[in-house]
Amino acid sequence: MRNSTAKPNEFTLTSLLSACTGNGCLGHGRIAHCQAMQMGFDSYLHVSNALISLYCKCGDEKEALFIFQNMPAKDLVSWNSMIAGYAYNGLALQAIDLFEEMKKERVRPDGITFLGVLSSCRHGGLVEQGGFYFNSMVEFGFEPEVEHYSCIVDLLGRAGEIEESREFIKKMHVDPNAIIWGSLLSSCRLHGNVWVGIEAAENRLVLEPECASTHLQLVNLYASVGFWDQVARVRRLMRDKGLKTDPGYSWIEIRNEVCWFRAEGSSNSKEITGVVDCLVDHMRSLGCLAETYQLECGYDLCTDML
């Protein structure tokens, strides 16, 4: 585009930054940031908001805060992006402080704002604060949506309050979706509550009958209590439906190039496995690992890492 007669504007840079954010390309994002500065677009509201999202999603919340604090003007998206960025990086107290500052500035929050605050409480394990902010939504005239309920379900579950999480689902004013049942299932797996986990898995399968991972989790839950007839039933369902799980993958950016790693079929899998084994041994020496959980695929994974 730069080599043509068309000239980029602030919306061009916003789209470019959003593309870098979506792929986690911090190096390319910094180059786009420099381009925005050279063209004089970095102070534009939409560009600044895109820069906040970029740096937060890529783990550089300090740079995001610098941009946020030096914006000539902020809108609701600016506040929401920074609060969500803190939540994304596990900085719960900073997200709450920014939300309180937002209220002092008389900026009216919306449902996305509360979603960011509740997400930060969830990641920070702040049960009381999460309940407080969830209940305070009514004061601002907002009726909680399924995403807000999901945060509380996950917050209670992660804290080990499985029964409280289960009762909260029953009292919801909306029908629970697959994500909510999945959150409860993950918490049950983390804290070893087999019976509620079976209930959560069965309910999730009603909503997502083609979800292979939930089938596998249900197989392991039934096997852990010796319900072999149910194990056989779920395995038959998987076989009849032709369900298979895709191997997991992760990625990292090295010298502006995104490198992908899959759980299976990687050319350097031995080297990766060796590094992971060293990390697990180090974590175990620090007392960070809980008891292992035997998955149907044959891997032993720590419950804290699932």
Image (cartoon, helix red, strand yellow):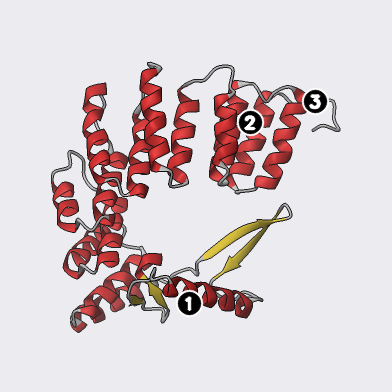
- Counting the numbered discs, the total is 3
Looking at the rendered structure, the kind of residue marked 2 is: Thr
Q: Earlier in the sequence, mark 3 or mark 1?
A: 3
Dot 2 falls on a residue whose secondary structure is helix
User: Which of the numbered marks, if any, corresponds to residue 281?
Assistant: 1
**Residue 287 visible in the shown view:** yes
Looking at the rendered structure, the kind of residue marked 1 is: Asp
Q: Which residue is tagged 3?
A: 6
Quarter of image, res 110: top left
User: Which of the numbered marks, if any, corresponds to residue 8?
Assistant: none
Check the picture and name the quadrant holding the N terminus. Answer: top right
Check the picture and name the quadrant holding the C terminus. Answer: bottom left
Of the pair 271 and 266, the residue shown nearer to us: 271
Q: Circle 1: is it few (<14), some (14-19), or many (20+) Cα within 10 Å?
A: some
> Spatial distance from mark 3 to mark 1, Cα to Cα?
56 Å
Quarter of image, res 211: bottom left
> Spatial distance from mark 2 to mark 1, Cα to Cα?
43 Å
Q: Circle 3: is it few (<14), some (14-19), or many (20+) Cα within 10 Å?
A: few
Residue 234 horizontal/vertical position (percent): 27, 75
User: Which of the numbered marks, if any, corresponds to residue 14?
Assistant: 2
Quarter of image, res 228: bottom left
Residue at (50% x, 66% y) in the render: 248
Dot 3 falls on a residue whose secondary structure is loop
